[in-house]
Amino acid sequence: MGMNTAMIGSRAPLRIEPRRIDPYDPFLLVLAVLTGLTAVLVLTPLGSGDYGQWLMTARPYAGLSLPDYRAAGAVPPVVPVLLGGLLAVVGDPIVAVRLFTIFTLWGLGGSAYFAGATLFGSRLAGLLATVLGLLVVEPFVDLFAFGGLLQANAIVFAFLTVAAFYRAPRAARHGWAWWTLGAVCLGLAALTHVGSASILVPTGVAVALVSARHGSTGRWTGLARLVPLGVILGVTASFWLMVLIPGGTDLVRNPASLDYRGPGRLVDGLTGSWPTVLVIGVGVGAILVGTAREIARRADGPWLVLAIWTAITLGVLAVAVLSGASTDYPRFATPILAPLVLAAGGAVAALLGIPARRVSSSQRRRVANWSAAVLAIVIVVSAPLAAGRFMTEANGYQLRDLASLSTAAAWINEHLGPQATVLAPVREAKWIEGLTGRPALFSNAFRYSFRSEEWERSLAADTVLRSSGALVNPFFFARLTALGTDQSAAHGLVIAANHGGEYLDLLSLVPDGTRILSPDADRRILATQVNLAAEGRTVSSTASALEVTSTWSGERRTASVALTQSVTLEESSSVLSLRASVATSLPVAGLELELRPAADAHVSTLVLNGSEATISFAPYGPGEPRLRLAIVDGTGAFERTAGNGIRVVTSEPSAHLLITDLTGAGAPSSTMQWLDPASLIDSYGVQAVLLARDPSLDARIARMESLGFTSIHDFGFYLLLVRE
C-alpha cells in the first residue's frame, strides 16, 4: 500500500495539451471563404428590386400589411416565412434583408461542404465543392447580386436532402433522424422555389429510393425507411393543390419570356466563362467514369447519386425546351451546376489524394499539407476575382440611394393611407412595397412579369410617367407626348412596337418635323405643328378599332390653318395607321412628317424604295426589331435624314402612313385600349409619385403637377409629389 502511494506520489502532474489548430483544415478554410464573401456582401450596397419584393412577401408573416393586389399564396412560403420571422425579431427591414442574405450565403456554402464531405467521405471534397461553387463558377454568387433568395435557399435544401438521404442507411446510429431530415429538407425545397421544385422533388425521391435499397434486409425494410418521405410529400402536395396552384403565376404564358429568357440565355450563362465550362467538363467526366465503375461493381455510391441528379435535371430541362414552355431558362443554371460542382469537388479531391497514397505513411502528412497549401493559394487568388465579378454584377442592380428611399418610405408610412398607391421607377417601387406595404405602380419589362395584371400595371405606369395618353393593341404601344404642362396638346408621338413580346420604343414622330409646305418656288414652310395652337383631342373607338385625333390651328397670311393628326389601331392588327391633313384656304404644296429613332433605339439598316421603307434596329432579345413603312396610294416618298431618321414628303395637303410591326410575338401582350393618365391615376388610386433626380425630372414634375400632384417633398436623391 505504501509502495503504491509512493508510486502515485511520484507520477508527473496531469497536463492537458491544447488542441493544435491546423491552418489547412478544410473546415477552417470553408469558414475563411464564407467570412470573406460575407464581408464582400456587406460592403456591396443592396439594390435589386427583387430584395424589396421578397421583403414585401414576408410582411404578412411579420404581422404587417400587404398590398391588396398582391397574393400571398402566389409565392412559395419558406423564404417569406423565414424572412418575416427575422423581420419580426430585428424590426428594421433593411437590416433583416441584409442578415437574411448573409444567412443564405452561409447556408449555401455550408450545405455544399456538408454534401461533398458526406457523399465522398472527405472534408477536402466538401471544401472543394464550396470553393468551386462560390469562387469559381459564377451563377451561385450571382443569385445574391439580383436577389435570387428563393432559388439560393432551394439549392441549400437540395444539398441537405441529397446528403441526408445518402447518409441515412450508412449511419451507425440515428438512421431515422437522417431519413426524417432528408424528407423535411425535400419538402422545404418544394416550398421554396417553384422552378427548382420541378427538378429537386423528383431528384430527392429518386435518391431516397436508391438509398433505401442500401443495406436493406428486405423489401419492407426499405419501404419503411421511406415513411417520413411519404408523409412530407403528402403534406407538400396538399399545400401545392390548395394554395400555390390556385394563387400561382402565369409565367408559362408570358409572351416575352421564351424569346428573351429562353434556352439560348441558359447556354450563354453556362458557357460565358471558362472556369464554369471547366467545372462542368470535370464534373460531367467524373460522373460518367465514376458511375460506370459503380455499375460495374453493382454499387450505389456517390457517383450514381450525382448521375441521377444530373439526369433528372437535364430531363426536366429537355421537356421544357421540347414543349416550348415559356419558363425562365437562365434560372436552370444553378440546378444544373449543383451536382456538377459536387462531382468536380469529389474528383479533384480524389486526384489530390493520389500522391498521399503512393508515399510512405511518414510522408503522407507532408504531402497532404502541400496539397492543402496549394488549395489555399488557389482560394487566395480566386477570391478577389470572384468578389470583383460579384460587385460588378451587383452594381448593375444597385439602387441609386437606398438611404434616401428609406426616408421617403418612412414619410409615406406616416402620412399616406394604407392603400395609397405610389407611382415610382421599378426598383424603387418594389422596395416601396416591401418597406411600406403600400401598393406601387411601376413599369417593368414584360419578360420579368408573371401575371397579366402586372403587364397592365406596367403599361399604365409608363403612360402616366411618360405621356399624355396612349393607344395599345397586341402589336403597338403608341404614346402621345406633350411639351410643357398642356396634356391635351399631344405634340409628339412615340411608337413602341411589340418585339418578341416586349414593347420597345423604336420611332418618334418629331413635332417640329411636321411641316406644312407653301407652293412657292423653294417650297417654304407655311407652318409647323409646334407653331400652331393645340385645339384638343378626341378619342373614338369601336369593337374593332381605336382612333385618337389631335387638332392644331393658327393664322398664316391672314388665313386660318388647321392641322389634324390621327393615330388608328385595330384589335388584332400589326399595322398602325398615321394620318395628317391640312385645312386652309391658302394653297398648300404638301406635307412633311419626320420620324427619328426613339431615344434608346439604334438603326442598323434603313432601306428606302420610293413610297416604302424597311427599318431594322440593333439586335435585342430574339433578334433585330423591324418595321415596314408604306405611304398609302403612293402620294409621296421617303427621304433619309441625319441620324438614320426618315422623312415622309407628300405633294398633297394630306399624308397617310402605315407602319407594320414585323417581329411581334405570337401571343398577345395586351388588348386594344386607350390609356388616359388622369383616369389611370383615379383607377389605381395613385396618391404619390416618387421621382429620381435625373435629366427628365423637370419635365416629369410639370406633367405630375398638371395631373394634380402639388405638394413636393425632398428626400435627397428623390422627390415625392403628393396629390392633396
Image (cartoon, helix red, strand yellow):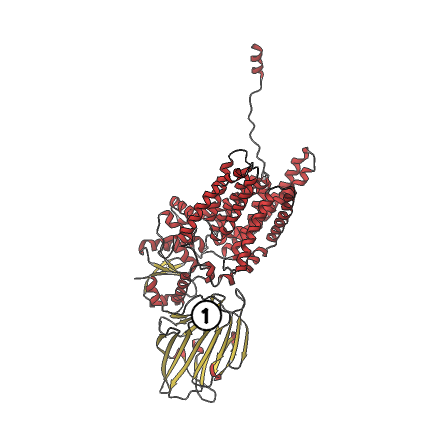
Residue 550 point in image, percent of width and height:
37, 77
Residue 110 point in image, percent of width and height:
52, 43
Figure quadrant of residue 19:
top right
For this view, does 57 lie left or right of residue 416? right
Residue 321 point in image, percent of width and height:
54, 59
Q: Residue furthest top?
A: 2
Residue at 51%, 63% in the rendered image: 259
Foreground of the two, 116 or 295: 295
Q: Is residue 273 visible?
A: yes
Q: Is residue 487 above or below residue 555?
A: above
Q: Residue furthest left?
A: 724
Residue at 47%, 89% in the rendered image: 521
Disc 1 secondary structure class: loop
Q: Is residue 179 above or below residue 408?
A: above
Which three-letter amino acid code belongs to the residue tagged 1?
Phe
Foreground of the two, 454 or 102: 454
Q: Is residue 383 visible?
A: no
The quarter of the rendered structure image containing the N terminus is: top right
> Within 10 angstroms of label 1, few (less than 14), some, or many (20 or more) residues?
many
Q: Is residue 281 above or below residue 114?
A: below
Q: Please name the residue that numbered disc 1 is placed on.
A: 475
Residue 314 point in image, percent of width and height:
56, 53
Q: Number of callouts in the render? A: 1
The quarter of the rendered structure image containing the C terminus is: bottom left
Residue at 59%, 56% in the rendered image: 271
Q: Residue furthest front?
A: 219
For this view, does 86 lie left or right of residue 210? left
